Image: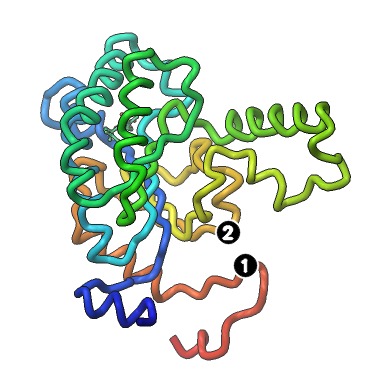
Amino acid sequence: MPEDAADSAAGRTRLGPRHVAIIMDGNGRWATQRGRPRLFGHHAGAQRVREIVESCPDYGVEYLTVFAFSTENWKRTQAEVAGLMNLFRGYIRREARALLANDVRVRFIGDRVRLDAKLTGLMDELEAMTAGCAGTNLTVALNYGGRDEVARATKRLAEDVGRGRLRPEDVDEETLPRYLDTCVLPDPDLVIRTSGEARISNFLLWQSAYSEYEFVDTLWPDFTREEFRRLLESYGRRDRRFGGVPAQGAAAR
Ligand code: FPP
């Protein structure tokens, strides 16, 4: 059965993007507005992750990548960093069963070297446990920075050149991404950032070269599956040119 027919038979609608990446911003402000500590906002944000992940099959989103902790987030207070690490451990323990039941394959990207062994152990376990899942592909960026990722990839590439496994003249736009943390993922079609900030903040720098962007004012803990749906529908009306000319009929839209 063709993919679209199979989707409609299963009651799913592909609204447009196959891979959506989200910069989940605004947890701190959301908590502050309520007179609560910042971590309260992060916990509320984690609830939204579940809602959005679970909406993906209904909207035909095959890949969802979320920015959970950046290489720059270590600059926050020790208490906030420790609270976030604790939240990530708790999230993996609590959500593992539901993720498996929902056929979600989980992957983590970012540099694990600075993360504690208990957390990386849980990350490994969750990746292994969900490796056979064929539904939504959830990628969690943890201690992730786009520049750091490109630097680590370049280091591994240079090592391969040094060992004679790769010839410098064979390095091109196809070769380098094979060394990135995202090597098994398609590039994101749509990147969403919440909380009214219009910047990329070192997220998926290489991969988002031709992504569409949506910057919305909603703070992440208020971001609902309905708003997600509206953004996906709006993406479906865009004309992606990848540096080319407008598609035929695009002007009429
Ligand atoms: C940015 O908001 C958010 C973060 C640095 C943390 C994101 C983490 C979560 C949403 C929690 C759980 C995620 C997973 C995958 C379990 P901010 O703190 O910078 O907000 P602010 O700009 O209002 O201060």
Give the amino acid type for the residue marked by disc 2 in the picture: Tyr
Residue topped by disc 2: 210
Q: Quadrant of residue 245?
A: bottom right
Q: Is residue 131 left or right of residue 152?
A: left
In which quadrant will I find the N terminus? bottom left
Pick the front one: 37 or 18? 18
Q: Is residue 207 left or right of residue 29?
A: right
Q: Contact, CB < 8 Å: mark 1 with mark 2?
A: yes
Residue 250: percent from left, percent from top: 51, 85
Pick the front one: 199 or 221? 221
- How crowded pointer 2 is (Cα within 10 Å; few <14, some 14-19, many 20+) is rated as some
Q: Quadrant of residue 106?
A: top left
Pick the front one: 231 or 13? 13
Marker count (numbered) = 2
- Mark 1: which secondary structure? loop
Question: What residue sits 56% from the left and 45% below the top?
Answer: 183
Task: Using the numbered discs, state the Cα–Cα distance from disc 1 to disc 2 in whole angstroms.
Answer: 6 Å
Q: Is residue 10 shown above or below 199?
A: below
Residue topped by disc 1: 242
Question: What residue sits 57% from the left and 83% below the top?
Answer: 247
Q: Is residue 196 visible?
A: no
Does the beta carbon of the residue at mark 1 sit less than 8 Å from ligand 1?
A: no
Give the amino acid type for the residue marked by disc 1 in the picture: Phe
Residue 8: percent from left, percent from top: 25, 79
Does the beta carbon of the residue at mark 2 sit less than 8 Å from ligand 1?
A: no
Residue 126: percent from left, percent from top: 31, 33
- Mark 2: which secondary structure? loop
Q: Is residue 101 left or right of residue 132?
A: left
Question: What residue sits 44% from the left and 86% below the top?
Answer: 253
N-terminal of the pair, mark 1 or mark 2, is 2
